[in-house]
Image (spheres, rainbow, N blue to C red):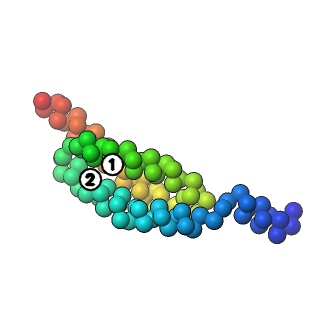
Amino acid sequence: MTPFAREATFMSEHPDDTATLQVLLERLVKFRLPRAIALKKRVDAGERLTDADMAFMKVALEDAQDGQQFVVRNPEFHTLGIQLVQLYEEIVEKATENEKKAQDGA
């Protein structure tokens, strides 16, 4: 296969993700990340998640799952993707710990 044919095959298999990545990053910076950081601070302080917080985390995790295909195809976003997943995992783990403490104390 010639280099041109390989490039054409790659381009047909992987559409230009620039616009989608831009929208995903904007949503992350303006909405998801500030709220996630605020939740992290709250759960680190021992607070429990509210129903609204849990709904946000559900949507944020679904968004992360949906965006995974773009991160995989664009290596420059691998580190960001990993850090975001780690942040979400830390929130869920600490929130679970806080719930258990609250139930044990009740």
In the rendered image, residue 67, in percent from the top left (x then y), is placed at: 51, 54
Residue 97 as seen in the image, left or right of residue 70: left
Residue 58 as seen in the image, left or right of residue 20: left
In the rendered image, residue 102, in percent from the top left (x then y), is placed at: 17, 35
The mark that comes first in sequence, 1 or 2, is 2
At horizontal 33% and vertical 48% (from top left) the residue drawn is: 56
Seen in the picture, residue 9 relative to 51 is either above or below; the reply is: below
| Front of the two marks 1 and 2 | 1
Q: Is residue 88 visible?
A: yes
Q: Is residue 94 visible?
A: no
Q: Secondary structure at mark 1?
A: helix
Seen in the picture, residue 70 relative to 102 is either above or below; the reply is: below
Which of the labelled discs sits on residue 39, or is there none? 2
In the rendered image, residue 46, in percent from the top left (x then y), is placed at: 18, 47
Task: Kindly indicate whether the residue at mark 2 contacts the one at mark 1 (C-beta within 8 angstroms).
Answer: yes
In the rendered image, residue 42, in percent from the top left (x then y), is placed at: 21, 52
Which of the labelled discs sits on residue 84, or is there none? none
Density class for disc 2 (Cα within 10 Å; few <14, some 14-19, many ≥20) is many
Q: Residue furthest right?
A: 1
Which residue does the numbered mark 1 point to in the structure image? 56
